[in-house]
Image: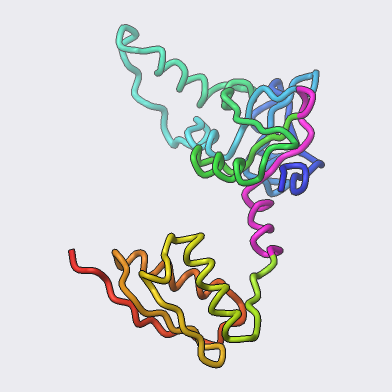
Amino acid sequence: MQAKDIMSTTVISISPSASVRHAVAVMLQNRVSGLPVVDDDGRVCGMVTEGDMLLRREIRVSPRIARPIETISEIDLERYIHSNGWCVADVMSRDVIVARPDSEVADISESLQTHRIKRLPIVGGGKLVGIVSRRDILRIIVDAPTTVLPKDDDAIRLAIRTRLRSDLGLTSQRVQVFVERGQVIVQGQVDSELKRKAVRALIESLKGAAGYVDRMSVAAI
């Protein structure tokens, strides 16, 4: 699945010359936590989010204590501009991670997790064409088809053995699978309690098993 399959094409964006107050009003009105910042040519030049507003001067009850000018660093000046600047360009993040319409959703999901961000602008031909948010990706989980096991005990056993080998590297020499009237019984020895839980997670993800009996043991260290 690619970005173009799930992205929102009606994207609410804002200009870098817009005021900070207007940007906040747009986010509140549209119930979004961030906006792509787009220049006059339709190119993404930044992102402005709720997080960018948390250190704004409007929030502080009293101003910070003035410091001697010789102790003010470049970082201090950048923070000052960020908290006091009037326009979006002063507060937005400029290092924006973007994706293409043909980018794989799995890669986008990994980028969102790795960089701890909530949305990714989708750029085609150098211009903003859509956006993919965490919520867009969550919908895939709801809509995803469930693996349904066959009703025959032998077929269920074969399907589970195949998945144990392909997903967890567990062969029939390590664990044995038995199925009695749809109930799955697994016995054998695994390396850790974590792998034991992984086996349970695998079987419980398969629709059609009448029950699960865990007779596995964990190898002593």
Q: Quadrant of residue 111?
A: top right
The residue positioned farthest toward the front in the image shown: 173
Identify which residue, 202 or 154, lies in the foreground: 154
Tell me: 77 left or right of 98: left
In the rendered view, tell whether residue 185 sits above or below residue 73.
below
Q: Quadrant of the C terminus?
A: bottom left
Q: Is residue 53 magenta?
A: no
**Residue at image location 56% in from the left, 88% down from the top:** 182
- Extreme residue in the bottom direction: 181
> What is the tally of numbered marks visible in this picture?
0
Magenta-highlighted residues: 124-144
Say above or below: 114 vs 40. Answer: below
Quarter of the view holding residue 25: top right
- Decide which of 118, 198 is in the foreground and name it: 198
Locate residue 6 relative to residue 82 in the image: left or right: right
List x then y, in percent, for residue 106: 61, 46
Residue 139 in the magenta stretch? The answer is yes
Q: In the rendering, at what x and y percent does residue 134 appear? A: 62, 49
Q: In the image, what residue occupies the spot 53% across and 66% down?
A: 163
Image x and y of residue 197, in percent: 39, 69
The residue most toward the top is 70
Residue in the image at 32% along x and 68% along y? 190
Seen in the picture, residue 102 relative to 216 is either above or below; the reply is above
- Tell me, what colour scheme is on the image? rainbow
Task: Locate residue 150, reporting x and y percent.
Answer: 65, 80
